[in-house]
Amino acid sequence: MGTGFIDINVDVGEGIGNESILMPIISSCNIACGGHAGDTETMRKVVKLAAANNVKIGAHPSFPDKANFGRKPMDISCAALYTSIKAQIDDLMIILKEENTRLNHVKPHGALYNMAAIDHKKAFVIIEVMKNFILPVKLFVPFNSVIEKMAIENNIPIRYEAFADRNYNEDGSLVSRNENNALIHESEQMFNHVYRMISSQKVKTIIGSEIKILADTFCIHGDNPKAIDLIQDLIKRLLEKGIQIK
C-alpha cells in the first residue's frame, strides 16, 4: 500500500460549465483569465466556487488567442506576450482581492505551456511575469523542461505537473492532440498511468517504454466529456492505495 498525498488540478472557467460538480472533488483549479477563454463574470463565478470548496486557485494564462482556444503556437513578440500574460493574471488578482482569497499558483495553458517547456524565449517571458509576485506563488511546470530549470535558477517556487489524461512521447513531451492516441479516456488506464508515476516516478510512453518523471500535481482537463467520472474513479482507486488528495 502507498502512503502520502497528491494534488489534482483541473482547468476551469473555459465555458464547459461543470465547475459546480468539479469543485467538491478536486484540490486545485486553474482559472482561464481571458487569453483563450473566460471573462470577468466567469472568473468571479469560479473563484467563488473554489473558495467555497477550499480549492486552491491558480491563474491559467494563455496566448491571447480565443479563436484557437490557445492551442496553436502564436507569432507574438516577447514584449507583447509579457503584457498579455501579466494583464490576464492581474485581472484575476483583482477578483481574488475582492473575494478576499489568494492566488496559489500559475499554470500556462495549451501551446504556451508546451512551448515554454522547450523554448527559452517563451519560458523567459513567463519567469519575468512571475517575478512580479511578492507572495510565494508557485509555477506549475513539466519535469525536465526549460521552464523548470529557468524557474529554479530564478528562485521561483515550482510544482511538477503531470497529466492524468494525456499520453507521453519518448522525450517526455505530450502526444499531440492531432494524434488519435493523445488522450486517455478509460478509468483503468488512467489509474495505472497515474499510479505508476506516483509509485515508481516513471511514465509509460506511447511506444511502451518507461521514462523518469516527477509529479506533485496531476491535471485532468475539465473539457474532457468524461472528466467527472474519471476523476471520481481515480480518487477512489488512489484512496484505496492510501494516497490522499489535498
Image (cartoon, rainbow, N blue to C red):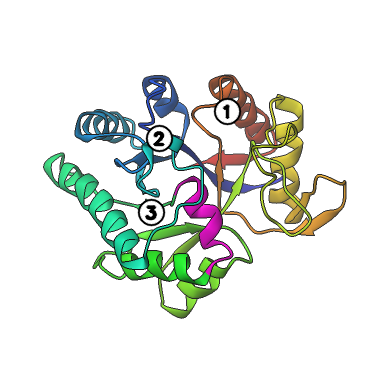
Inspect the image, locate mark 2, and give the three-letter code of the amino acid beneath it. Ala
Task: Assess whether mark 2 and mark 1 are in contact (beta carbons under 8 angstroms).
Answer: no
Binning the other alpha carbons within 10 Å of mark 3 as few (below 14), some (14 to 19) or many (20 upward) gives: many
Mark closest to the chain's N terminus, 1 or 2: 2
The residue sitting at the right extreme is: 208
Spatial CA distance of label 1 from label 2 is: 28 Å
- The residue tagged 3 is 106
- Residue drawn at (59%, 20%) of the image: 226
Asked if 101 appears above or below 119 in the picture, the reply is: above
Inspect the image, locate mark 1, and give the three-letter code of the amino acid beneath it. Ile
Mark closest to the chain's N terminus, 3 or 2: 2
Nearer the camera: disc 1 or disc 2: 2
- Disc 2 secondary structure class: helix
What segment carries the magenta color?
109-119
The residue sitting at the left extreme is: 98
- The residue tagged 2 is 67
Mark closest to the chain's N terminus, 3 or 1: 3
Q: Where is residue 210 in the image (x, y as percent from the top left)?
A: 83, 54
